[in-house]
């Protein structure tokens, strides 16, 4: 067996650290964690709290726009007339300070186009806060 021994004049120290094995180990650990972490988090069961939603009371200064099943519009329980009349009335109500909220009550059988038209008129009038009013679901019905 032959061994090369450095001579007395060639005793330079190697100061560079070879990081290739360290990088290889880190990549293997990264791959293992990427594979195992989603399996661990997906199998965790969490018991979330059960809450019921309390209905908000309609304030007196709120604007209530009602759309019945036939698509007729009512503003604060008064017939609203045409879309232009409703828009003019909404613009006058939007000038109040502070600006009132708009609550839209739509019949279950109302077509979406009628409700979409009301939303457009509310936007055109410059009103910013729009709420949809619903009835709580009956017990056992989701």
Image (spheres, helix red, strand yellow):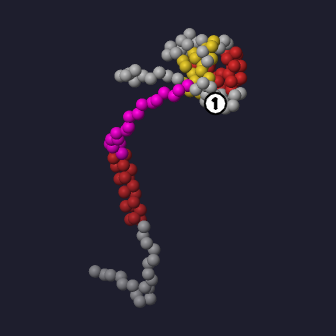
Compared to 110, does 27 lie above or below? below
Which range is magenta?
A: 41-58
Of residues 84 and 76, the one drawn nearer to the viewer in this rendering: 76
Q: Return the residue nearer the eye: 89 or 46.
A: 89
Left or right of 41 in this view: 90:
right
Identify the residue position indicated by label 1 in the image.
128
Look at the magenta stretch and give its main secondary structure: loop
Residue 81 visible in this rendered orientation of the protein: yes
SS for dot 1: loop
Residue 102, can we see it?
Answer: no
Q: Is residue 64 above or below residue 28?
A: above
Q: Position of residue 134 (x, y in %)?
A: 49, 22
Tell me the quadrant of the picture where the C terminus can be found.
top left
Q: Residue 51 appears at what percent x and percent y?
A: 41, 33
Q: Who's the residue at 37% across and 22% down the image?
A: 139
Q: Residue at x 68, y 26 (%)?
A: 94
| Residue 12 image-quadrant placement | bottom left
Image quadrant of residue 113? Answer: top right
């Amino acid at each position: 067996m032959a061994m090369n021994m450095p001579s007395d004049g060639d005793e330079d120290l190697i100061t560079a650290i070879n990081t290739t094995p360290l990088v290889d180990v880190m990549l293997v650990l990264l791959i293992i964690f990427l594979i195992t972490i989603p399996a661990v988090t997906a199998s965790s069961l969490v018991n979330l709290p059960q809450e019921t939603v309390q209905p908000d009371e309609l304030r007196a200064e709120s604007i209530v726009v009602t759309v019945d099943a036939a698509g007729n519009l009512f503003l604060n329980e008064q017939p609203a007339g045409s879309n232009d009349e409703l828009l003019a009335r909404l613009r006058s109500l939007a000038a109040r300070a502070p600006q009132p909220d708009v609550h839209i009550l739509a019949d279950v059988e109302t077509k979406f186009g009628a409700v979409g038209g009301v939303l457009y008129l509310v936007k055109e009038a410059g009103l910013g806060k729009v709420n949809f009013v619903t009835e709580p679901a009956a017990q056992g019905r989701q």
